Amino acid sequence: GQQLNQSPQSMFIQEGEDVSMNCTSSSIFNTWLWYKQDPGEGPVLLIALYKAGELTSNGRLTAQFGITRKDSFLNISASIPSDVGIYFCAGPMNYGGSQGNLIFGKGTKLSVKP
Amino acid sequence: AAGVIQSPRHLIKEKRETATLKCYPIPRHDTVYWYQQGPGQDPQFLISFYEKMQSDKGSIPDRFSAQQFSDYHSELNMSSLELGDSALYFCASSHKQRDEQFFGPGTRLTVL
């Protein structure tokens, strides 16, 4: 079945640093979504990408839909403490008549450097 | 802007009991999805509804059932609860099955 491979699994950030994470798949996705989840809360949609090659920004966040439609990356510039959390990539399943239910990557956990 | 509402936020049940989780989608959203998230895991799709009809089914146990009502709210009914059902349960909604799904705050179910 479809799978999303997200990396890195975790990373530590210092305030002001830029952060980058990515998601790859062996199958094609027509949409890439990036969510952020705080502990015990629901995922919050950050960016949605719909076209191969699309580059979209949301404040300090920038995400790109890979040309092959099999990958996407998310960049966070000038990180601040509230960027801490778990970031998930997600895409709608598109086989067997599925109707858009999402599959998720395993997440990238952002923590503050001690 | 109005968001997805879920109730209750926390629920504690004993094994073999039943539980009902409720979800109120964003106004004018007609599609509801249910996901289960275990500790340290990513959300896993359970079931979805579009215009009050079941549209897709994922890894939902036979002990669970769900429906979407005429006002578009949805309920997830869980019976014969097991310890392994302890998890966060999220509802998400979208408009006309669009890929952008907006999640509620979740219900934390603990089965003792």
Image (cartoon, rainbow, N blue to C red):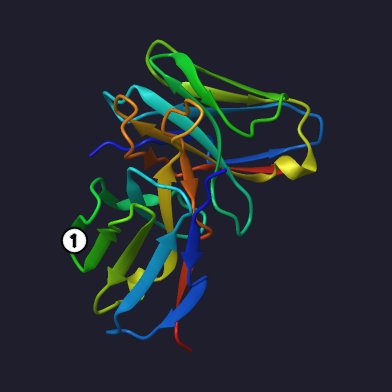
Please provide percent x and percent y for residue A21. 39, 70
**Residue extending furthest toward the bottom:** A114
- Which sits in the foreground, B93 or A57? A57
Residue drawn at the location 47% of the way across and 78% of the way down: A11
Relative placement, left or right, of B87 versus A30 is right
The amino acid marked with disc number 1 is Ser
Residue B28 sits above or below residue A23 on the image? above
**The N terminus of chain A is located in which quarter?**
top right
Relative image position of residue B57 (x, y in whole percent)? 56, 26
Please tell me in which quadrant of the rendered image residue B18 appears.
top right
User: Relative to the observer, which residue lies in front, B60 or B25?
Assistant: B60
Identify which residue, A34 or A23, lies in the foreground.
A23
Where on the picture, by quarter, is residue B26?
top left
Above or below residue B94? Residue A85 is below
Mark 1 packing: few (<14 Cα in 10 Å), some, or many (20+)? Answer: some
Residue drawn where x is 28% and y is 26% of the image: B27
Q: Is residue A78 above or below residue A93?
A: below
Q: Position of residue B92 (x, y in %)?
A: 42, 36
**With respect to residue A8, does A44 lie above or below?**
above
Residue at image coords 29%, 77%: A79
Q: Tag 1's secondary structure?
A: strand
How far across and down, in percent of the image, does residue B64 sit? 67, 25
Total of numbered circles in the picture? 1
Q: Is residue A29 left or right of residue A26?
A: left
Question: Which residue shows up at 22% across the image and 56% down it?
Answer: A53
Quarter residue B88 falls in: top right
Residue sticking out furthest to the right: B16
Report the residue marked by disc 1: A57
The outermost residue toward the front is: A68
The subunit carrying tag 1 is A
